[in-house]
Amino acid sequence: AWYDTVRTVGACSPAWMKEISGWLLCIMKQQNEALFWPYTDIPKLCDVAEANGLNCIGLFGWTKGGHDHLYPDYDPDPKMGGVEALKAGIAEAHRRGIRVFIYANGQLQQVGATRFWDEHGKRLALVRENGRLVVQNYHKYSDIPRYDFALGCLGAKPWYDRMLSLAGQAESFGADAILYDQLGIFAPFACWGEGHGHAAPAYVYAAERPGFLRRITDTIRKKNPNFAVLTEGLHDTILDSIALFHGCETGTYPKVLEEIKARAAGGRTGAFPELWRYTFPELVTTTRVPSPLSTRTMANYTTLFGMRHDIELRYAPDRDWVLDGKVPAKEGYGTVRSLPDIGWMQTNDPKVAAAYLKDVNLFQRQHAKYLLQGSFRDEEGFALQAPAGVLAKRYVAKDGTSAVLVWNTADRAAAVSVRGLGRASEVAEPGAGTVAADAPLAGDTLRLYCFGGGK
């Protein structure tokens, strides 16, 4: 209630954002400029998205320099097909009912590598008290140099102008949104830089961050009200300007699954996704799965908490896995320094994994009034009778009807009963359709009990 006196959650979120049940994130060209997906392959990305039931695609590494290289220059690459091929690919995605967002990093600029750095960047980079820059390093391949990235000051006009121009560029390509990486993650920094438009020193990324993003969002949406601004992380100062958050915090990574299962069995853990979902039910946020597949358990976890699904294509073996079903080996990643969870791909059949994620995505959209558009009410208003290991969450639709989503996290079937809301008008499971309300709930399976009006 206090927050509502300060900002309006979702004030800049277009209506279509609530229709997104998940996305396919694709790094088209990597940091070493290895090209995996030219613009002419966007239809193939649509095929992969559709096979997994996903209705959004994120284009990362879509520029000449590739991902995590030559920021903040984001120029379409003639070698990937050029601007017209990029526009055509986005148009094809739209024809198939798939939304597209374009990537840009909201704070990083490669030191000494771009014209922007020479003209503006080195003068607006965040500076520590000792005069050194605030620098991050991303070194993905052992056989290329380590690139240094200085943080741009959000209070400096040239940085704002550059980020705004990238939003305009994405919109001109026909994209539905731009994602500014990292701006929902970091705490304020003490900056001692001069000439940035703030006192020296000052804590930047404080008042500057919400103002910076809201100005960009308001400006680009005056031109196109259906355009959206996204970011990585989850930060309470920017809930009015950001339409969707790319999950990158406790509660949105695969590693929380064992914690959630432990809590379902009566244990105490640190993961508590209910807090965000209950306090800000308007939020749209993804989970984070840096792998070409989401396991059944991860898909169920994401659905239970009303988040959006995520799978990611980052390297050459990932392409082979999703297109041809070729199981990757460690050697296939060559000089990649930080490998994905190869075990997921070696122990899960790609077609089976995609089919289940598709079932779950379609299930969410079939029951969108609850699972995508409804208000998360956690465990309020009903009683669950079930053994340890079963979790249940209530969703309330705009018309006042309710549904309770139940997840049996255990490996064996369980007897489940939902009481306190009357007789269920519909009971359904992903991929199975209507089921009997009193049938045993299989292990690692979801079931939705609808009350007072069904879908």
Image (cartoon, rainbow, N blue to C red):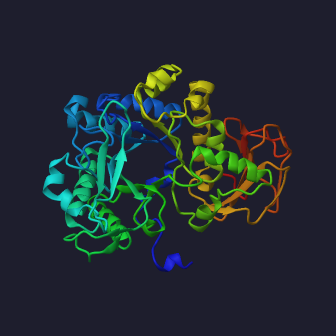
The x, y position of residue 432, in whole percent, is: 71, 35
**300 or 145, which lies in front?**
145
Is residue 22 found left or right of 441 in the rendered image? left
Q: Is residue 250 visible?
A: yes
The x, y position of residue 292, in whole percent, is: 50, 33
Q: Is residue 448 visible?
A: no
Q: Is residue 326 above or below residue 71?
A: above
Within the image, what quadrant is residue 120 found in?
A: bottom left
- Count the labels in the image: 0
User: Which residue is found at the position 48% from the left and 33% from the top?
Assistant: 339
**153 or 239, which lies in front?**
153
User: Which residue is found at the position 26% from the left and 44% from the top?
Assistant: 173
The x, y position of residue 400, in whole percent, is: 66, 65
Is residue 298 found left or right of 450 in the rendered image? left
Is residue 52 found left or right of 94 in the rendered image? right
User: Which residue is found at the position 51% from the left and 45% from the top?
Assistant: 22
Q: Is residue 204 above or below residue 324?
A: below
Quadrant placement of the N terminus: bottom right
User: Which residue is found at the position 32% from the left and 49% from the top?
Assistant: 104
Within the image, what quadrant is residue 214 found in?
A: bottom left
The x, y position of residue 185, in whole percent, is: 45, 58
Q: Is residue 333 above or below residue 98?
A: above
